[in-house]
Image (cartoon, rainbow, N blue to C red):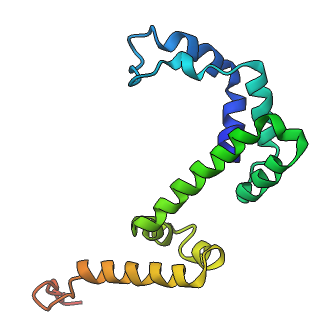
Amino acid sequence: MFTFLDRMILLRLAVNRFVPLADDSPEVPNLVKKSYATFRLSTQDWDQLERIRGSASEAMAETWRNMAATERFADMRESILAGLDNLEKWYGKTDDTDVYFICLALDPNIKTAYTQESWNSESHEEGLAKLESLYDSYYVAPTTENVPEVVQTGK
């Protein structure tokens, strides 16, 4: 989330130029039942994004809960709580598929270290079992028929 906010703020001028022009451009795909103008950000919106960027991190959910509870962010409380609800909804969807764990496990930079540290042990073990099961369903043991013949040279 931090990276997204950081990039968004870095590209503020480009975003501000793109949004009012996008609806009339034949080069930009049309949105379904919305216009790009709907996503115009005011100066106050940009200021709020900069405040949020200061608090965004891997542990953003806890940070956002704390922000929503403070008076400093009272004007954004409803939006923060709605964002947390949305985050939890989409995070929960990772439980509905094996792909998330498998992608993490197959990423050479992550493997299973992240899930081992950050997930509860039951979820981690369940992910490993699903990965092994999927691997077993695709694995074909080599046979002597599949092994190429080694040709000996006279050296």
Depth order, front residue of 86/52: 86
x and y percent of residue 95 in the render? 47, 67
Q: Quadrant of residue 122?
A: bottom right
Q: Relative to residue 67, is residue 108 drawn left or right? A: left
Q: Quadrant of residue 28?
A: top left
Depth order, front residue of 118/151: 118
The count of marks equals 0
Q: Quadrant of residue 30?
A: top left
x and y percent of residue 126 in the render? 46, 82
x and y percent of residue 10 in the render? 72, 30
x and y percent of residue 138 in the render? 24, 77
Q: Relative to residue 142, is residue 132 drawn left or right? A: right
In the picture, the quarter occupied by the C terminus is bottom left
Q: Residue at x 47, y 60 (%)?
A: 93
Q: Is residue 147 above or below residue 68?
A: below
Q: Residue at x 60, y 75 (%)?
A: 119
Depth order, front residue of 12/155: 12
Q: Is residue 92 above or below residue 118?
A: above
Q: Relative to residue 65, is residue 109 drawn left or right? A: left
Q: Relative to residue 116, is residue 42 drawn left or right? A: right
Q: Residue at x 70, y 58 (%)?
A: 58
Q: Is residue 15 above or below residue 118?
A: above
Q: Residue at x 77, y 19 (%)?
A: 43
Q: Which residue in the rendered view is the most extreme toward the left?
A: 145
Q: Which residue in the rendered view is the most extreme toward the right?
A: 71
